[in-house]
Image (cartoon, rainbow, N blue to C red):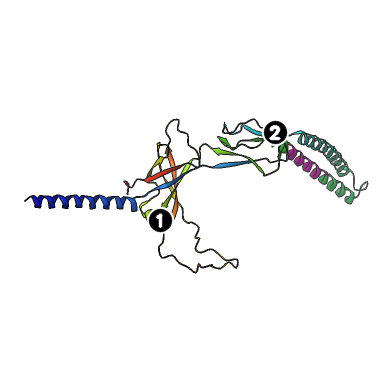
Amino acid sequence: MKKFFSLLATLLVLTLAIGIGRSLWEHYMNTPWTRDGRVRADIINVAADVNGYVVNVPVNDNQLVKKGDVLLEIDPEHYQIAVKQAESLLASRKATWEMRKQNARRRADMDNLVISRENRDDASNIADSALADYQHAQAQLDAARLNLKRTKVVATVDGYVTNLNVHPGDYARVGDPKMAVIDKHSFWVYGFFEETKLPHIRVGDSAELQMMSGEVLKGHVESISRGIYDRDNPQSRELIADVNPTFNWVRLAQRVPVRIHIDEIPEGYLLAAGTTCTVIVDQAGQ
C-alpha cells in the first residue's frame, strides 16, 4: 500500500510538472508579449529658413518649450536692409505705374484725330506693364519681410529641446538642422513581436507596458507593420533578385513592429524616447 501511494504521489507530481511546463511553453510561444519594446516619439529637426550668424539662443538643453517660443535668432541686419531696399523699389514702381496709368487715361480721352489708335493701345500696354512691375515689387517686399521674420526660429510644437549644440556665433545655413525638439504629445511604443505571435494580435487590443524602471503604463494596439526588410533577398545593381546561394535550415522567427498607443501615463513619470519596456497584449477581447 505504501508503494502504491508513493507511486501515485510521483505520478501526481509528474503530471503537475508536465501541466506547468506545458502552460509555460504555451505562454512563452503563443501569448503575444515581447521584451523588445522601444519608446518612440516624433523628433522635429529645427533648421533655419535663412542664412546668417546665430546671435541668440534663448533656450537651454532639455528645456520644455511651447509652440511659438523662440529657439534661436539669426543676425537680422542684412534682412532689415533688404526690407528697406524692397520698400524703396516698391515706391519707385508705384510712382511709375501711377504716371503710366494717368498717361494712358489722357490718351484714351483724346480724339482719334489727335492721337492714333496705335499710340492709345501702346500707352495702355505700358501702363499694364508698369502695374505688373509694381506687383512684382510688392511680392519682393513681402519676401523680404518674410525673410526678416524668419530670422527668429520658433518651435512648431510643444516639446523638449534635446542634445542642444548650437551657440551664438555659429553660422546657420538654410535647411541645415541646428537642434532637435521632441514633441511632448507624440510618445508611443514600438513592440517587436515574433511573426508566430502576430495571429494573436488585433488592432484595438489593450496592452500593458512594463517599463524597466518598474512603472506600468496602459495602451492599445494602434497598428501592425505590413513589411520588414528581407536581408536574404536584396536587389542586385541590375535590379534583379540577388538570391543567397546558402540557406539555413534552422529559421528564426522574424520580428515585426507593432505600434502601441499610450493611453495612460502615471503622474510625474518621466517618459523618454529610446527607453525599453516589455509589451504584453491582452487577448481577453478575442
Q: Give the farthest residue toward the right.
A: 114
Q: Secondary structure at mark 1?
A: helix
The answer to whether residue 192 is seen in the rendering is yes
Is there CB contact under 8 Å for labels 1 and 2?
A: no
Q: Which label belongs to residue 195?
A: 1
Indicate left or right for 231 with 198 as reference: right
Identify which residue is drawn at 50% across, 58% down: 229
Q: Position of residue 145 (x, y in %)?
A: 73, 36
Q: Amino acid at mark 1?
A: Glu
Region in magenta = 130-144
Q: Is residue 98 left or right of residue 39?
A: right
Rounded to the nearest angstrom, the CA distance separating label 1 from label 2 is: 50 Å
Q: Magenta span: helix, strand or loop, mainly?
A: helix
- Residue receiving disc 2: 168
Residue located at (13% from left, 53% from top): 7
x 84%, y 48%: residue: 125
Query: Image height check: is 241 above or below 58?
Result: below
Say which amino acid is labelled 2.
Answer: Pro
Q: First in sequence: mark 1 or mark 2?
A: 2
Q: Residue 197 in the image: x percent, y percent?
A: 37, 53
The quarter of the displayed image where residue 127 is located: top right
Which of the two residues, 261 or 168, is positioned nearer the viewer here?
168
Q: Is residue 279 left or right of residue 110?
A: left
